[in-house]
Image: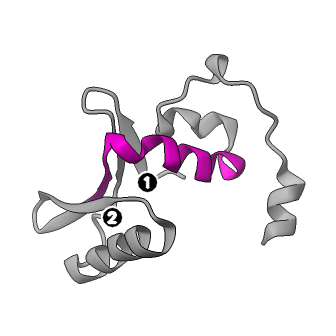
Amino acid sequence: MGDGNYLKEKNIIRIFTNSFVKNDVELLSRIINDRIGINSKVIYDRNNQYIIVIEKDDIIITRDLLLPFIHPSMLYKLGIKNQDFNYKFNYLSIINDI
């Protein structure tokens, strides 16, 4: 949950994959696109490093998919303020899903 953020100015989610080689980042982006159905793209960040970006059109889908697994302290990474969103984080259901 730690390697990414929501960029409010552009309404995008960034997944920081900087420590991976470009081919692996592209593979992960294709898997997100093809198997999960969320449109993502690979963006050059810096120093031959690449990140994955999820555009505004797929923010809602991404949130709906990830919310059951996100700890409340990490909701800001999806652009959600804790006080604006009321749900109970169920640790046991996540453990059972694993």
Q: Earlier in the sequence, mark 1 or mark 2?
A: 1
**Does 32 sit left or right of 75 as displayed?**
left
- Of residue 53 and residue 72, the one placed in the foreground of this image is 53
Circle 1: element type: loop
**Does 76 sit left or right of 39 as displayed?**
right
**Among the 4 quarters of the image, the one containing residue 50:** bottom left
- Of residue 78 and residue 39, the one placed in the foreground of this image is 39
Residue at x 27% of width, y 64% of height = 18
Residue at x 24% of width, y 79% of height = 21
- Helix, strand or loop: magenta stretch: helix
Magenta stretch in the rendered image: 52-70
Question: Residue 92, relative to residue 19: is it above or below?
Answer: above
Residue at x 32% of width, y 60% of height = 40
Q: Amino acid at mark 1?
A: Asp
Residue 38 rendering spot, x and y as whole percentages = 42, 59
Residue 39 rendering spot, x and y as whole percentages = 35, 59
Residue at x 82% of width, y 35% of height = 88
Quadrant containing the C terminus is bottom right
Residues at marks 1 and 2 touching, judged by CB atoms closer than 8 Å:
yes
Residue 75 rendering spot, x and y as whole percentages = 58, 35
Residue ranking furthest to the left: 47
Residue 24 rendering spot, x and y as whole percentages = 30, 81
Image disc number at residue 11: none
Q: Which residue is mark 1?
A: 3
Question: Residue 32, relative to residue 16: is it above or below?
Answer: below
Neighbours of disc 1 within 10 Å: few (<14), some (14-19), many (20+): few
Q: Which residue is mark 2?
A: 17
- Residue 55 is a magenta residue: yes
Q: Amino acid at mark 2?
A: Thr
- Residue 42 is a magenta residue: no
User: How far is disc 1 from disc 2 in space, using C-alphas?
Assistant: 8 Å
**Does 93 sit left or right of 72 as displayed?**
right
